């Protein structure tokens, strides 16, 4: 099923890239909410965000101010004219947010991972015309992400978008949540009209990574960014290290290079044609390689040899990794390519031996 979508159509927000949503991780006090909103409004930000209910990994931490924080956001909207947005995780959250005039809702990563929870939100939103953004699930599961979007769409939500906030990984290095750009790129390939908003705060987990991550999102054609900004980030009650001052956000946005989504030029078309030709040549070469692999399988079958020869496999990975590095490619990339080739080669050899 395809997603039936309309533009987000946020009143008073120019329909241009990038859409910017910003505000503190958590609505801590009324003074903090109003102060941050005023500074962001002065910087030209049109959509204010703040966490009203905060899902915590362990009990005992600050879990948000709930209903009274919604009142603070109403006051911020009245004083600045900004639209307001917050995360919802239960039908009760949805009802309270809509009653308080919240203009945009988003579903968090933990909730997206639970189809029962998403369906309960979708049921609550039937017949409601409000823009909804769905964050990717914590784990790198594109189908689960699409499933959440479809549940909302089937409930009648047409002003629908996605938020890419990175994915949890056991091999965490630079980022709090690995970007895994290929996943939102595939989502965009399947649903070209789906707006994708990037969350550099949760992806990077550090304020010094926000600027370069925002630029990467623009380079990939994302429709906007949702950035955590606080009037006093070092004293924030949650996720202090990933929040920036409004004036710093204004500087980042001013330096951001927004790539055009215009139709490709003749010169770009020519370069893409060259890529297509080389891709075809790669397929021909891989076909030849698999043909030789099957011939090797016939030899192994006759001589009763095991399919996988680990010493040979290690030799291939080592040699090709060095060659890749000398050609300007990362060893990790080369390793992934030849692991995939080896996996297919083994599959075909097993097929031959078992005939």
Image (spheres, grey):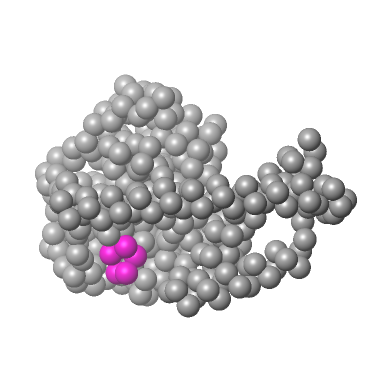
Q: Nearer the viewer, residue 130 or 234?
A: 130
What residue span does the magenta drawing correspond to? Answer: 211-216
Tell me the quarter of the image containing the C terminus: top right
Q: Quadrant of residue 256?
A: bottom left
Location of residue 31 in the rendering, given as x and y in whole percent from the top left corner: 26, 62
Q: Residue at coordinates 38% horizontally, 24% vertically from top-left?
A: 155
Q: Is residue 293 above or below residue 42?
A: above
Q: Quadrant of residue 101?
A: top left
Q: Is residue 233 above or below residue 81?
A: below
The reply to whether residue 349 is in sight is yes
Residue 114 lies within the magenta run: no
Q: Residue at coordinates 15% horizontally, 51% vertically from top-left?
A: 266
Is 177 placed left or right of 42 in the picture?
Answer: right
Q: Is residue 89 above or below residue 258?
A: above
Location of residue 174 in the rendering, given as x and y in whole percent from the top left corner: 48, 71
The reply to whether residue 139 is in sight is no
Tell me the quarter of the image containing the N terminus: top left
Q: Residue at coordinates 50% horizontally, 71% vertically from top-left?
A: 324
Q: Nearer the viewer, residue 128 or 341?
A: 341
């Amino acid at each position: 099923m395809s997603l039936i979508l309309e533009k987000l159509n946020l009143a008073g927000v120019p329909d241009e890239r990038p859409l910017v949503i910003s505000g503190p991780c958590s609505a801590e006090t009324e003074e903090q909410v109003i102060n941050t909103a005023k500074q962001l409004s002065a910087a030209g930000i049109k959509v204010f965000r703040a966490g009203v209910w905060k899902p915590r990994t362990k009990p005992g931490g600050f879990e948000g101010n709930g209903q009274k924080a919604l009142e603070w956001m109403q006051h911020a909207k009245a004083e600045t004219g900004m639209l307001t947005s917050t995360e919802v995780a239960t039908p009760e959250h949805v009802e309270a947010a809509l009653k308080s005039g919240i203009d945009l809702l988003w579903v968090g990563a933990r909730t997206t991972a639970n189809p029962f929870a998403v369906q309960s939100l979708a049921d609550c939103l039937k017949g409601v015309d409000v823009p909804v953004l769905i964050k990717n699930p914590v784990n790198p599961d594109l189908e689960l992400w699409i499933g959440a979007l479809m549940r909302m769409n089937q409930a009648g939500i047409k002003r629908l978008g996605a938020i890419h906030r990175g994915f949890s990984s056991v091999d965490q290095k630079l980022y709090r949540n690995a970007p895994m750009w290929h996943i939102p790129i595939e989502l965009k390939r399947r649903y070209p009209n789906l707006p994708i908003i990037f969350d550099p705060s949760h992806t990077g987990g550090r304020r010094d990574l926000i600027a370069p991550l925002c630029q990467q999102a623009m380079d990939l054609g994302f429709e906007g960014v949702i950035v955590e900004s606080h009037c006093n980030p070092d004293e924030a009650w949650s996720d202090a290290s990933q929040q920036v001052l409004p004036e710093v956000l204004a500087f980042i946005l001013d330096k951001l290079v927004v790539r055009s989504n215009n139709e490709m030029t003749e010169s770009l078309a020519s370069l893409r044609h060259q890529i297509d030709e080389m891709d075809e040549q790669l397929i021909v070469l891989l076909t030849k390689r698999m043909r030789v692999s099957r011939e090797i399988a016939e030899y192994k079958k006759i001589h009763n040899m095991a399919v996988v020869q680990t010493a040979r496999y290690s030799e291939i990975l080592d040699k090709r990794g060095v060659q890749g590095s000398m050609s300007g490619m990362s060893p990790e990339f080369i390793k992934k390519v030849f692991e995939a080739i080896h996996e297919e080669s083994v599959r075909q050899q097993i097929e031959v031996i078992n005939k």
